[in-house]
Amino acid sequence: MLSPRFLLLRSTASLTSRSFSGGAVLKQGKAPDMAEVRNRLREIVGASTNWSDHQQAMSERLSLSDMLAKSQDDLPLKRMKDSRLEVHLPLGSEPQLREKYLTFHNTVRFGRILEDLDSLAVLISYSHTHNPALKKTPLSIVTALVDKIDMRQHIIYPDCDIKFSGHVTWVGKTSIEAKMHMSQYQNGAYSPILDATFVMVARDPENKRAAYVNPLKPEGPEEEKLFQEGEANKVRRVELSTASLLKVAPTDEERKIVHGLFLNTLDTKTVSFRSRLLPPNSVWMEDAKLKGLEICHPQERNIFNRIFGGFLMRKAYELGWANACSFGGCRPSLMAVDDILFQKPVEIGSLLLLSSQVCYTQGNHIQVRVHSEVFDPLTRQHNTTNVFHFTFISDREVPNIIPMTYGESMLYLDGKRHFNQTVEP
Ligand SMILES: CCCCCCCCCC(=O)SCCNC(=O)CCNC(=O)[C@H](O)C(C)(C)COP(=O)(O)OP(=O)(O)OC[C@H]1O[C@@H](n2cnc3c(N)ncnc32)[C@H](O)[C@@H]1OP(=O)(O)O
């Protein structure tokens, strides 16, 4: 795992003796770097620093199960400000840090930002669930969903300081919604770069069963509004999942779109269902794929000895970007990320197959879906672990993407739904 060097500027109340990540105490005037933050996270969950100790560390965590709350009512109410964090990424003032974030084209690697956001969401969640009476937390908090990342500005400069901030905005019984903002220092002030919403889920010390999190008490109309939005987000997520094209047929309008695409590819000379012709300025979906393989080494493990969610996002993003770049014939910018679902943990040692597909285009926009699955070479079984959705914008019109099979048509419609949701909500 290659996490950035964060400098914590301010947690909730004061830097003097406040815990920001479930037990870690900040000393006044001393801003911890990311190594310290990671060490603290390891301390909080009792994770091993060496892979060779991981089994012992996990067995020690087992004893923490007794500390889990039996019901949510047993846990004290928390306020939004209990989890509020502000973190500094000094790309401008610390040039040696820049290297890790730099692209060949002198912009910031967005994959690295995804890793940072993931770490921040974990920190925020541990701040919310912090119990000062416990030395180690019994909770294993994992990323379940990146609900949305909206880009407010497409260019992130590699030589200007960055600031992240965020806090818990909604909680369910065992899940936590965290909203984060990123801004960059330019021309004497910080201007917004992106807004992100993550859903984290609390599990028992072994990461096997769901575990209760503290209830959240919004204070004042602004916090009430955020909480209501969180509630609405939950309802929307359930509705979206119910309407998934993997479960139900497309709508009437969507069926017409698919049929229109089909008719547009028929060969008028042969009048056959089988003979298909690619319309001008178009690319078959089959020809808009890019694949990759990752061997999941212990270095990329998270504090629970699974593959770090941020690493998976970085790899998926970079593959998706390369595919969009190859498809559009120029370097695209990211417009939005939505609905990144972490369905199953990725075990250390897994073979991770990543497959990206341009699934929808409109004007100069490219919608890319990246699917990741673990492959067991001994049993030859494949298991989907993640699905990622990225919306890119190119500086020129891109070709139309055309599905040939029914399955591809569903991918096309799913891509269109994601595009409409993020770009034309
Ligand atoms: C060293 C320092 C570095 C710091 C970084 C540390 C990073 C640590 C974070 C990670 O890297 S985590 C790694 C990436 N994530 C994963 O591997 C998670 C993989 N997915 C899973 O394990 C399961 O799918 C998951 C635990 C997320 C959900 O499992 P289930 O579907 O069985 O959950 P369940 O039905 O028990 O529901 C539990 C809660 O999750 C909620 N939930 C489940 N799936 C969801 C979803 N897709 N969207 C929103 N909420 C979801 C569900 O509503 C419910 O909330 P409430 O109790 O509040 O109602």
Image (cartoon, helix red, strand yellow):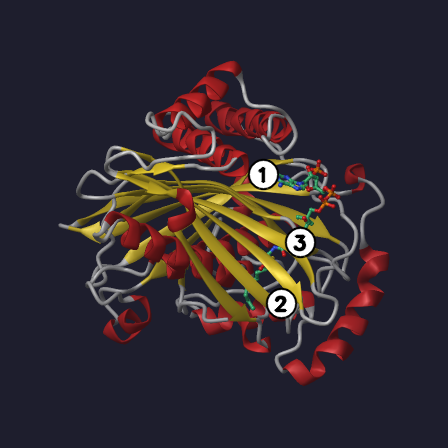
Q: Which mark is residue 79?
A: 1
State the image coordinates of residue 364 (x, y, percent, origin top left): 24, 37
Image coordinates of residue 180 in percent, x first then y, are: 44, 45
Give how far apart the Cα atoms at labels 2 and 1 are. 26 Å
Expressed as whole percent of the image width and height from the top left, the position of residue 328 reads: 25, 48
Nearer to us of marks 3 and 2 is 3
The amino acid beneath tag 2 is Ile
User: Circle 2 is placed at which residue position?
Assistant: 303
Q: CB of residue at label 2: within 8 Å of ligand 1?
A: yes
Res 323 → quadrant: bottom left
74 w.r.t. 310: above or below: above
- Give the camera-side residue of 172 and 338: 338
What percent of the width, then of the height, locates residue 233?
55, 29
For mark 3, give the secondary structure. Answer: loop
The label on residue 344 is 3
Quadrant that contains the C terminus:
top left
User: Residue drawn 55% across and 62% down?
Assistant: 353
3 and 1 marks in contact (CB < 8 Å): no
Look at the numbered disc 1 and give the secondary structure of its residue.
loop
Q: Residues within 10 Å of mark 3 (few under 14, many from 20)?
A: few
Which residue is at the front of the view, 15 or 315? Answer: 315
Given the current orientation, which residue lies at the most extreme left position?
187
Which of the two discs, 2 and 1, sits closer to the camera?
2
